Image (cartoon, rainbow, N blue to C red):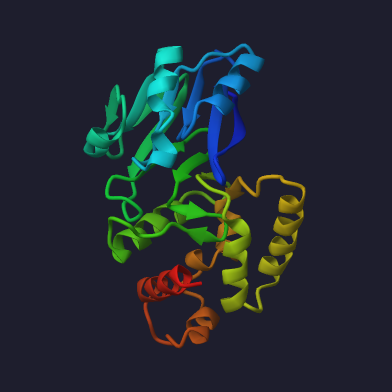
Amino acid sequence: MSVLNVNILPCLSDNYTYIIQDKSSDKVIAVDPPVVEPITNFLNKLNLKLDYILNTHHHADHVDGNLELKKIFNCKIIGFEQDSYRIPGIDIQLKNHEIWKFGDEAVRIEHAPGHTAGHVFYHFQKNKLAFVGDIVFPMGCGRIFEGSTKEMYESVVKIKNLSNDTTIYSGHEYTISNSKFCLKLDKNNSELFKRSKSVLSLRKNNKPTIPTTVQLEKDTNIFFRCEVQEIKNNINMKNASSEEVFAKLRGLKDNF
């Protein structure tokens, strides 16, 4: 199995770009590059070139580095077929559920609308990695811009349904705000208290709170815990479905 190194590069005020290196071939992917300089600096330092860009969605803070990086490295840009008209410089258009091969790793593309209509995530199946853009964050989920609450709920559930040991890489550093929201409505969750302390310590030292795992989100992310009776009670939705609870929580978070 390909051994993949994932490097986290902070960009702009709170974005993350991920540089994925296949150690056996030195082939390199950049995920969602909003700018060029941190990426070229990192690659030049290690004497690597960029082979591919993976885009999760079309927002400028995830694609604005595409064209210049393509010019510098002649790399191939990969994105979702249905959103190809909004992905600058796209070369490889993948269909929903299609498998793209990176060395011997099978990368499955999953359509996950809600934040945008054409949002996708990339599931590296052997290495158990998921690059999820702005669908899920540590202790949070993305805002709904182009889709419905139902779509966003179903997209979050797709990530929740990955194996518990899947490592999740999100597009932004929003964790402190997310943890405060979760603490307000999931007060008796000891795992959440423990994690929130750890998050404050990481940020104090200017370290990323990413990656996370599916299991950690199941334990602490309120948007993964919509079936928990205590949370339903706390928002006066005692008999509501998980989807209805999700909708209420997303609305509350929008105004938090």
Vertical placement of 159 versus 150: above or below?
A: above
Asked if residue 253 lies left or right of residue 177, the reply is: left
Residue 124 image position (x, y, % from top left): 47, 34
Viewer-proximal residue among 73 and 245: 73
Residue 242 locus on image (x, y percent): 40, 73
Give the residue at x 61% y 65%.
Answer: 179
Q: Which quadrant holds residue 3?
A: top right
Rendering quarter of residue 207: top right
The vertical placement of 91 against 47, above or below, is below
Picture mark count: 0
Q: Which residue lies at the image location 28% right of the left edge and 39% below the top edge? A: 96
Question: How far across and down, in percent of the image, does residue 173 sit?
Answer: 58, 50
Location of residue 77 in the rendering, given as x and y in whole percent from the top left corner: 36, 24
Above-or-below relation of 125 to 216: above
Residue 181 in view, yes or no: yes
Quarter of the figure with the N terminus: top right
The residue at the point 49 percent across, 31 percent down is 35
Observer able to see residue 95: no
Left or right? Give the position of 240 relative to 35: left
In the displayed structure image, the side of residue 165 where residue 244 appears, left or right: left
Q: Residue at x 40, y 15 (%)?
A: 71
Q: Nearer the viewer, residue 220 or 203?
A: 203
